[in-house]
Amino acid sequence: MMIKKVLLIEDDTALRENTAELLELANYKVLTAPEGEKGVLMAKATHPDVIICDIMMPKLDGYGVLKALSADNRTKTIPFIFLSAKTEHKEVRLGMEMGADDYLTKPFEESELIGAIESRIAKANILKESQQNNTGDTSGNEPQVKSIHQLKNFIDDNGEDFSFQMGDVIYREGDNSNLVYLVIKGNVKTHKLDEQGKELITGIYRADDFFGFTSFTKNIPYREYATAMEDSTLIGLHKEQMKMLLEQNSELVLELIQLLDEDLTQIKEQLLHMAYGSVRKKTASTLLKFADKLQKDEAGNIHVLRSDLASVAGMATETLIRTLSNFKKEGIIEIKDRDIRILDMDRLEKIPY
C-alpha cells in the first residue's frame, strides 16, 4: 500500500514536532513547514495527500494559505484541515466557506487527528473515482452539504434566528418537535422532570453544538425540556429541511450518526456514575463536565448554579454543596459565590468510585 503524504504547517515548534512524530508512527510520510509562505511553496512542490494547517501564524495565516492553494489548479483539490485553538462559530464558518474540509481544535486526541486525515483522504478518493466514472452526470442540483461543518453553515444561512434570556424555556416536553437547533452563543441545558418535579439534566450544549433531535420519520414530540442557562442565541432549522439534506447526502448521515453516538456515550457515562458512583465521584465528574462545556472567565472560573450541578449529578443540592465544601477544604477547588475554579484537575479526575 502506498504511504500517504501529509503536509503539516504549524508555527509552534513543539506542537509541530510532536504531531509529526505521531503521524510518522502511524505510517504517514510527514512534511513540515514552520509558517504559511513556506507551506504554500511546499504544497505546490510536493502535492501531498492532505494538508494540516494552523490558523494563527505570522506572515501568512491559515486563511491565506488556503486562499493561495485554492487559486492553483494543482493544489485546490488537496484535502485541507485547519488546526486551531478553541474557536468561535464565525471563525470556523469562515474557514469552511473558504473551502476547508475539516478543522481540529487544540488540544486534540491522536484518534481525532488520524480519523480526520483518513476520512478526508478517503472522501477525496471517492470523489475522484466518481468524477471519472460519471462524466455524463449533470444533476448537480442537490445542496452541497457533505459534512457537519457544512451543515452548520447551511443552518446559519437558511435557519431562523432565536434569542433567549437566562432561564427562558426553549421548548417543553410534549411540544411539537419541528426544529433542530444550533447554538451560536451561550449555553443550553436539556432536562427531564420526575413526578415530584425534581430536575435531571440530560445534556449541556455550548456554542457550535446541536440539540433538539427527534425522529425524522415519525411525528414524535420533544421528550425533554430545553432551557437557556444564560443569554443565548440559537438558529433553528425545520426538521423537514434537515431530513431532505440527509436523504441527499450519505456522507452527512455518517457524520451525524457519529455525533449522536458521542452524545449517547456521554449519557451512558452519566447514568453509570449516578448508579454506581460515590457522592464524591458524582460531584467530581459533574464539575469536569461543566468545566468542559461552560465558558471560563479570565481567572478560570466557571459560573454555574448549584441546583444545575446537583441535577446532573443526580443528588440533592444540599449533598452536593457539602461535597463541594470538602473539595474546597482539600484544595481541589476554589469557591466564591456562584464561581468555581478547579485548582487540581488531576486529583479531581482521579477521585475513585
Image: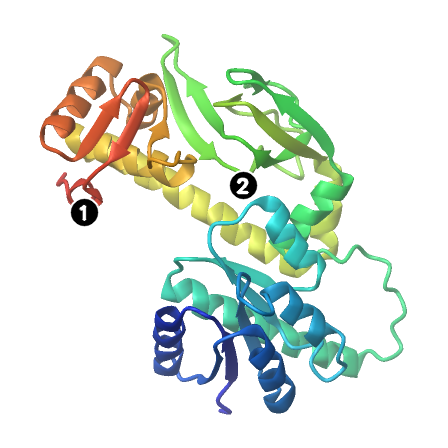
Q: Residues within 10 Å of mark 1 (few under 14, many from 20)?
A: few
Q: Is residue 231 left or right of residue 195?
A: right
On the image, numbered disc 2 is attached to which residue?
Answer: 209
Point out the residue furthest to the top here: 196
Q: Residue at x 48, y 26 (%)?
A: 190
Quarter holding residue 318? top left
Give left or right: position of 192 versus 48.
left
Question: Mark 1 or mark 2, which is nearer the start of the sequence?
Answer: 2
Q: Amino acid at mark 2?
A: Asp
Residue at 75% x, 55% y is: 248
Q: Quadrant of the C terminus?
A: top left
Q: Is residue 190 visible?
A: yes
Per the image, label 1 sits on a secondary structure element best described as helix
Quarter of the image where one finds residue 302:
top left
Question: Would you say residue 278 is visible in this rendering?
Answer: no
Q: Amino acid at mark 1?
A: Asp
Front position in the image: 101 or 178? 101
